[in-house]
Amino acid sequence: MAYEPWQPGMTVTAGRLLSISPTWQEWTPIWTTTGASTPNFGNSAVSARWAQSALTVFYRVDIAFGSTTNFGSGTDNWQMSAPVAAPTTSGIVGFGEIQNTSSPGSRQPIRVRLGTTQGFQFEMAGGNIAATSTTTGAGLIDASTPGAWSAGNSSLRFWGTYEAAP
């Protein structure tokens, strides 16, 4: 069989490439908890973008908590809505960081997981960059984990990929 370098209908054009490439778009995540203590973004700066290619969802979120942010209370684990539902929950679908900008060296890594098919949860993934232990702040992030959040001085950034429900 001879190699045919060009097949009818298989021409690569800018339009064809655009049609199969994911297009990034904005979404506004809904912030809830696993309990009754509902947080609120207040005047936070929230940038959330996502794209989908076939069943793969790409996302990135950057939140600078504002001076009127309500972090909820107690140990009701935070959840944020995903842009597209997943077929199942998943242990790790991304990574990120949290930081209290009023405390130098406080940036800490986090893992992102799908606690539900429609929402992200956040796990502490290590100590902060100043090598401080997180033994008192291990587990899922909430209003008191890994410690007290500071309105106007804290941030949450996360990004990753996951499979979309068919």
Image: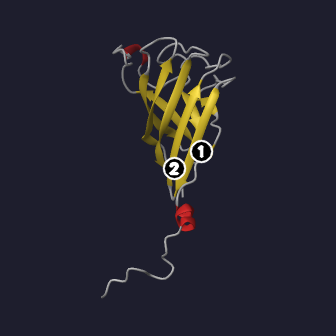
Q: Residue at x 55, y 50 (%)?
A: 51
Q: Residue at x 36, y 19 (%)?
A: 127
Using the numbered discs, state the Cα–Cα distance from disc 1 to disc 2 in whole angstroms. 8 Å
Above or below, 63 against 117 in this view is above
Image quadrant for the C terminus?
bottom right
Residue 139 in view: yes
Q: What residue is disc 1 on?
A: 83
Mark 1 and mark 2 lie on one chain; the one further toward the N terminus is: 2
Is residue 86 shown left or right of residue 72? left
Q: Secondary structure at mark 2?
A: strand
Above or below, 62 against 105 in this view is below
Residue 57 is labelled as: 2
Hey, what amino acid is under mark 1?
A: Pro
Residue 9 position within the rendered picture, expressed as x and y whole percent measured from the top left: 51, 79
For label 1, the crowd category at 10 Å Cα-Cα, with few meaning under 14, some 14 to 19 and many 20 or more, is many
Residue 72 is labelled as: none
Is residue 133 shown left or right of residue 166? left
Instruction: List the single residue furthest toward the bottom.
Output: 1
> Quick one: 35 or 73, which is closer to the camera?
73
> Quick one: 54 or 6, which is closer to the camera?
6
Is residue 135 shown left or right of residue 49? left
Residue 49 position within the rendered picture, expressed as x and y whole percent measured from the top left: 58, 42
Residue 84 position within the rendered picture, expressed as x and y whole percent measured from the top left: 58, 48
